[in-house]
Amino acid sequence: MVAAQTLEGLMTLDQAATEHSAIEGSWRGAEAYHLWLLAHRQLYDGQFEYARRTSLLLQEYEDLIDPVDIYSFIALACFYSKHYGRCSKAFIKLESITHAAKDRQDAYADLATSIFIKHPPADPASSRARKPDLHEPPFGPKAILTHTCMASGRDVGHADNTMMCKVCKHRSIVGELRGRQTCPLCHARYKTGSALDPASLLSSSVESHMSPTAPTMRSANHALV
C-alpha cells in the first residue's frame, strides 16, 4: 500500500515536471524574438548599455535566430557601448561561423582590423571588475525564465522589485515597466491586488522608480568605422 502510494506520488511529480518543462520550452520562440526586437529598439533609442546586455542573451537562441545575425548585432551593440573586448569576441565568432560566405568572413576581418587599430579590444574597467552575471554565458533557459527582466533584458537583482506574469511566468522589474500594466512578453494584464502600488505604475516619472541596479545610460560619440 505504502509502495503504491509512493509510486503514484513520484509519477505525479514526474508528470508535473514534464508539463512545466513543456511550458518553458513553448515560450522559447517568443523569448527569442521579443529579446531580438527589444535589443534593436534599445540600440535605436541610444540605450547602448541596455542593448549590449540584451544582445548577449540572444546567444541562448542560436537554434532560432541565425548566429550571423546574433553576433553581428552583439558586435554592433558592444561597439556603441564601448565594450571593445566583447566586440572583439563577437567578430572572432563571426569569422569562425562555417556557413558564412568567404567574402563575408573577409569583410568581418577587415572591419575588425579597422576598429581595433583605433580602439584596443578591452572592456571598460568597471565592467571587468564586476562579477559575472546572466549576460556572461552560459546562463541557460531556466535563468532566462527566472532571472531576466522581460521589460529591459536586465539581470534581476536582489534589490529589484519585480512583477511575475501569471500567464507566461516571466518577470519584469517594476522600474523598467515605465507605467505599463501588461507583461512585455505575452501582453497579459498583471493582476490587481499585488504588492505593486497602482499609483506608481501610472506615474509619468521614469526616474522615480528606476531600479538601483539599472545600468548607466551611455551615448557613443563615435561612428562605426
Image (cartoon, rainbow, N blue to C red):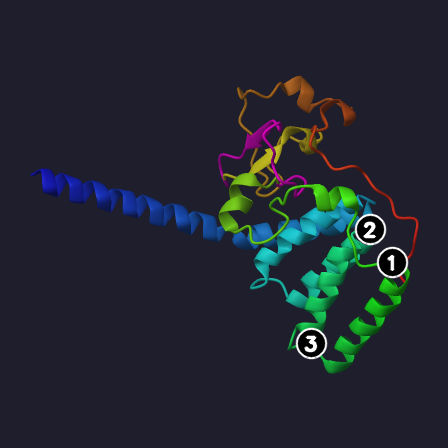
Q: Nearer the viewer, mark 3 or mark 2?
A: 2
Number of numbered discs: 3
Q: Are marks 1 and 3 in contact (CB under 8 Å)?
A: no
Residue position marked by numbered label 3 in the rendering: 100
Q: Secondary structure at mark 1?
A: loop
Q: Which mark is residue 77?
A: none
Amino acid type for the residue under numbered disc 1: His
Q: Residue placed at 87% from the left, 58% from the top?
A: 119
Q: Residue placed at 73% from the left, 44% from the top?
A: 127
Circle 3: is it few (<14), some (14-19), or many (20+) Cα within 10 Å?
few
Amino acid type for the residue under numbered disc 3: Ala
Q: Quadrant of residue 1?
A: top left
Q: Which mark is residue 82?
A: 2
The residues bearing labels 3 and 2 have C-alpha atoms spaced at a distance of 26 Å
Determine if the magenta segment contains residue 84: no
Q: Main secondary structure of the magenta part?
A: loop
Q: Residue placed at 88% from the left, 60% from the top?
A: 224
Which residue reaches farthest bottom? 102
Task: Please tell me which of labels 2 and 1 falls first in the chain.
Answer: 2
User: Which residues are the magenta region?
Assistant: 150-168
State the residue in front, 105 or 196. Answer: 105
Say which quadrant the C terminus sits in.
bottom right
Q: Are marks 2 and 1 in contact (CB under 8 Å)?
A: yes
Which residue reaches farthest left? 1
Q: Quadrant of residue 64?
A: bottom right
Instruction: Tell me where residue 130 appears, x and y as whole percent.
Output: 69, 41
Task: Please tell me which of labels 3 and 2 falls first in the chain.
Answer: 2
